[in-house]
Image (tube, rainbow, N blue to C red):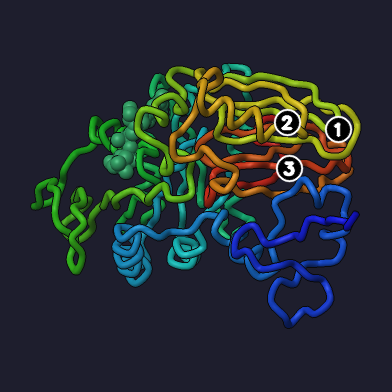
Amino acid sequence: MAKIKRVLRCHRCGVVLQSKKKSEPGYINPELIASETAQESLLYCNNCYEKLKAMNGSVLSAESDEQILKILDDAKATDALIIWVIDTFLFNGTISPEIVKKVKHLDVVVIGTKIDLFDKRVKREDISNFIRDRFEEVGIKPYSIHLFGKLSNLNGEELLAKLEKARAGHDVYMIGSIASGKTTIINKLLGSFKNKSKWQIKSETYGGTNAKILEIPLSNSAFFYEVPGFSLVNSVLGKVEKDVSRLIIPKNKVITQTKNLDAGESIMIGSLGAISLVKGKTTAFKFYSGELVEIKKHSNKHLQMHMAENCEKKTYRPVSERYNSFQDFDLFEYTMENDGLMHDISISGLGWVSFIAKGQIVHVLLPKGVAVKESLSKIK
Ligand SMILES: Nc1nc2c(ncn2[C@@H]2O[C@H](COP(=O)(O)OP(=O)(O)OP(=O)(O)O)[C@@H](O)[C@H]2O)c(=O)[nH]1
Ligand SMILES: [Mg+2]
């Protein structure tokens, strides 16, 4: 009888994988192809892997994003103050390098929104520190960080006074992802705003673009602009159907569900993602998400089958018609540090798992192109 062996191919481009010649197509690091997890992994040639890593970070690609970059050229040229609005639930720490390039040398005030979605016991300081660390990682030292929740009393007058000082006579540009809460904050601030200029508040097409942006006069020569939101191209929310995203977005609070996994076990997140413990001691994975996201424990071996089955039966939500075969997903392997500290692996838009890092090997399966980020925990 002839012997048969599976030929390993790159999951992205299909090239046959080899680890002999770096300069030839299909090169993959030898330890990856030889690893005990190779057979159950989606493997990528080094070339595709580099592209994939970039793609699963925070990149801008929509046409509207081009216009934002153009607007930010003006901000840069006029030494404006930037207010960067972050949805504290959605923010997983992946920050677009293109935006960073534009605002790096400006003062950046960060406002974290939707803090009301978190349990009261969650320390605001933890969330602030998480935001600060992620910004500092990309070379931005926030001028200040403020947290805001719909129900909390944002002191408009106080914040306006702080912004007035921070802008030092210059323009202000408010930026952030779509639906991060920019307009909600502005409406709150407008309650305390007194127009001392000769201009009116208006919604204008910004020069050189076709983006309509809100313009608030701060003086006769300085303005506050609400820049259109960055697209959600790297978020699950930008990939799935509207009714599916409504299931994913937290309504009133972020919930946690904890599963203890042994090596060889996975958490299936509806049929939109999975976290698998490939190697390591039993680990408690705490999953943070919106209230309607359902998770289920399975063995890694049968994960593909269960995900496919769930796509049909929709027992565990969310399920998207756009992601119903393994070809529609990316797979990343994390070899964790052995520092005994709480770490997060976050799937942009869907949620994140927190667990104590003890040198485990963890696989993360997620819709193609969605940003994934590993960091020290957002919530201690
Ligand atoms: N729970 C909660 N929801 C909020 C908060 N801030 C905003 N939202 C909700 O988030 C959604 C988007 O808010 P907007 O203020 O319109 O966001 P935006 O950044 O102006 O969005 P674009 O202009 O489309 O980029 C709305 O449904 C708001 O009600 C908040 O602090 N807490
Ligand atoms: Mg808005």
Mark 2–mark 3 contact, CB under 8 Å?
Answer: no
Secondary structure of the residue carrying tag 1 is loop
Quadrant containing the C terminus is top right
Residue position for label 2? 302
Residue position for label 1? 263
Secondary structure of the residue carrying tag 2 is helix
Residue 377 or residue 218, whichever sits in front: 377
Which of the 4 image quadrants contains residue 343?
top right
Residue 295 or residue 60, whichever sits in front: 295
For the point 57% across and 17% down, the residue is 120
Mark 2 to mark 3 CA distance (whole Å): 14 Å
Q: Mark 2: is the Cβ under 8 angstroms from ligand 1?
A: no
Q: Amino acid at mark 2?
A: His
Mark before the other along the chain sequence, 2 or 1:
1
Q: Amino acid at mark 3?
A: His
Mark 3 crowdedness (10 Å alpha carbons): few <14, some 14-19, many ≥20: many
Residue position for label 3? 363
Mark 1 to mark 3 CA distance (whole Å): 11 Å
Q: Where residue 231 appears, x then y in whole percent?
A: 37, 50
Residue 236 visible in the picture: yes
Secondary structure of the residue carrying tag 3 is strand
Mark 1 crowdedness (10 Å alpha carbons): few <14, some 14-19, many ≥20: some
Q: Amino acid at mark 1?
A: Ala
